[in-house]
Image: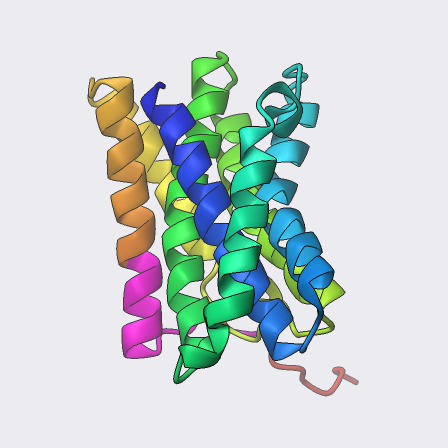
């Protein structure tokens, strides 16, 4: 398995865990756990593959992606009650998943010969879309859209770091690892230190 394939599998596993934990907070049944886990784990990669015209889509070409997501859902179904704070676990697992998904998405787009803007968008989409779908379906405010939350910003930073590493002549594997590390460093710092980005402040219209 290539490094990009490994990163894709890792992001599926970790994102599936976050989807199942969100299902536990919503007190869903085991089928609901599996649905949220699969939606979260595969949403970003599916959209990426469709837009890049990569056939077959990752989980159709390799059903082990689906098996991984469903296994994660079942494990969480029986163990989530042991966690002291499921929301905190979701935040940190999501940070890990975002890191590897951004690196995988941007790396795959770069390997396919896509230009820099497409590489950035594919990295961000792979990292952010699954979590967005998870939170919308679970009727929660998406992390991506929380006021001042540097989520998409961290994904963008990670994708940019992959392009920078590639421009510096790093091997594709090293560039992908650098991207994952940069994304996680940004997101973990935002969570640990409470970083926020400026938000729009409405003002009365000028007369």
Residue at coordinates 34% horizontally, 49% vertically from top-left?
183
Residue 2 horizontal/vertical position (percent): 35, 19
- The residue closer to the viewer here, 75 or 86, is 75
Q: Is residue 182 left or right of residue 198?
A: left
Residue at coordinates 55% horizontally, 34% vertically from top-left?
65
Residue 107 horizontal/vertical position (percent): 41, 26
Q: Is residue 91 left or right of residue 77?
A: left
Q: For residue 34, say whether it is visible.
A: yes
Q: Is residue 138 left or right of residue 148?
A: right
Residue at coordinates 50% horizontally, 64% vertically from top-left?
76
- The residue closer to the viewer here, 86 or 190, is 86
Residue 154 horizontal/vertical position (percent): 40, 54
- Image: magenta residue range: 186-199
Quarter where residue 202 is shown: bottom right
Q: How many numbered circles does the render carry?
A: 0
Q: Where 27 falls versus 95 (above or below)?
A: below
In the displayed orientation, state which residue is furthest to the front: 78
Q: Is residue 19 left or right of residue 60?
A: left
Quarter of the picture containing the N terminus is top left
Quarter of the picture containing the C terminus is bottom right
Q: Where 145 falls versus 17 (above or below)?
A: below
- Whether residue 144 is in magenta: the answer is no
């Amino acid at each position: 398995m290539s490094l990009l394939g490994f990163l894709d599998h890792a992001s599926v596993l970790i994102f599936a865990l976050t989807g199942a934990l969100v299902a536990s907070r919503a007190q869903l049944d085991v089928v609901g756990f599996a649905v949220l886990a699969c939606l979260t784990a595969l949403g970003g990669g599916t959209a990426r593959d469709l837009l890049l015209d990569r056939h077959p889509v990752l989980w159709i070409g390799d059903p082990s992606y689906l098996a991984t997501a469903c296994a994660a859902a079942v494990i969480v179904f029986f163990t989530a009650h042991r966690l002291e704070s499921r929301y905190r676990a979701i935040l940190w697992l999501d940070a890990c998943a975002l890191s590897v998904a951004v690196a995988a998405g941007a790396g795959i787009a770069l390997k396919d010969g896509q230009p820099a803007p497409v590489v950035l968008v594919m990295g961000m989409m792979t990292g952010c879309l699954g979590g967005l779908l998870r939170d919308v379906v679970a009727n929660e405010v998406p992390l991506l859209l929380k006021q001042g939350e540097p989520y998409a910003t961290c994904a963008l930073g990670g994708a940019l770091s992959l392009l920078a590493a590639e421009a510096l002549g790093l091997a594709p594997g090293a560039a992908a690892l650098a991207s994952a590390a940069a994304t996680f460093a940004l997101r973990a710092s935002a969570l640990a230190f409470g970083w926020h980005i400026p938000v729009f402040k409405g003002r009365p219209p000028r007369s």
